[in-house]
């Protein structure tokens, strides 16, 4: 580990591990700490596309959250689409469909896309934990 001397001290000074800068830091640890901007930078530094190809389903959901909370909707979408492709038919893939719908809501031009993803969730998990929320969001998008 990289060790630095405490500032203002010479020989025999207390040593502490250096803090890694965000690109070298563990993006998962940063995400758990709520530091989503730094986690996103770290994931990009590790190769975001490569992570999308190698992470397990839970890791991809976490990576998508990092993108979303870090303000990069395109990266969140990239992780969710990778999850849907690599883990098709899984509970995590259905959750990714719900999250893709969530990403698309709030933008009137994309409400059709949101409905498609929410309907995908309902079709894939008709008794899923988020089925009521998906149906509510479909109704909101379609309006009165």
Image (cartoon, helix red, strand yellow):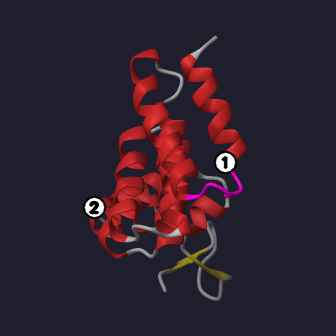
Q: Position of residue 66 (x, y in %)?
A: 52, 52
- Decide if residue 130 is on the left or right side of residue 53: right
Residue 27 versus residue 70 in the image, above or below:
below
Q: Disc count in the image?
A: 2
Q: Are marks 1 and 2 in contact (CB under 8 Å)?
A: no
**Residue 135 drawn above or below residue 91:** above
Asked if the magenta segment contains residue 142, the reply would be no
Q: Position of residue 115 (x, y in %)?
A: 49, 32
Q: Residue furthest top?
A: 144
Q: Specify whether 78 is left or right of 37.
A: left
- Which mark is on residue 69? none
Residue 53: x, y in percent?
Answer: 30, 70
The residue under the point 59% across, 59% down is 31
* SS majority, magenta: loop
Labels 1 and 2: the sequence-earlier one: 2
The residue shown at (52%, 61%) is 61
Residue designated by label 2: 49
How crowded pointer 1 is (Cα within 10 Å; few <14, some 14-19, many 20+) is rated as some
- The residue tagged 1 is 131
Mark 2 Cα-neighbour bin, 10 Å: few <14, some 14–19, many ≥20: some
Viewer-proximal residue among 63 and 13: 63
Q: CA distance from mark 1 to mark 2?
A: 30 Å
Query: Residue drawn at (41%, 68%), measured in percent from left and top?
Result: 24
The magenta stretch is 125-130
Q: Residue at x 56, y 67 (%)?
A: 91
Q: Using the image, determine if residue 113 lies above or below residue 94.
A: above
Q: Position of residue 25 (x, y in %)?
A: 48, 68
Camera-side mark, 1 or 2: 1
State which quadrant residue 19 falls in.
bottom right
SS assignment at label 1:
helix
Q: Secondary structure at mark 2?
A: helix
User: Nearest the camera: 61 or 134?
Assistant: 134
């Amino acid at each position: 580990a990289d060790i630095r001397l405490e500032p203002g001290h010479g020989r025999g000074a207390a040593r502490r591990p250096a803090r890694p800068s965000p690109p070298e830091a563990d993006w998962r640890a940063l995400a758990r700490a709520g530091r989503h901007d730094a986690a996103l930078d770290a994931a990009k530094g590790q190769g975001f596309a490569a992570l999308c190809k190698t992470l397990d389903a839970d890791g991809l959901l976490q990576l998508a959250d990092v993108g979303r909370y870090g303000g990069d909707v395109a990266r969140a979408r990239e992780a969710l689409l990778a999850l849907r492709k690599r883990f098709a038919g899984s509970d995590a893939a259905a959750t990714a469909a719900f999250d893709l719908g969530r990403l698309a809501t709030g933008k009137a031009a994309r409400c059709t896309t949101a409905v498609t993803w929410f309907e995908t969730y309902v079709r894939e998990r008709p008794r899923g934990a988020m089925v009521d929320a998906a149906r509510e969001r479909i109704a909101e998008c379609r309006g009165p």
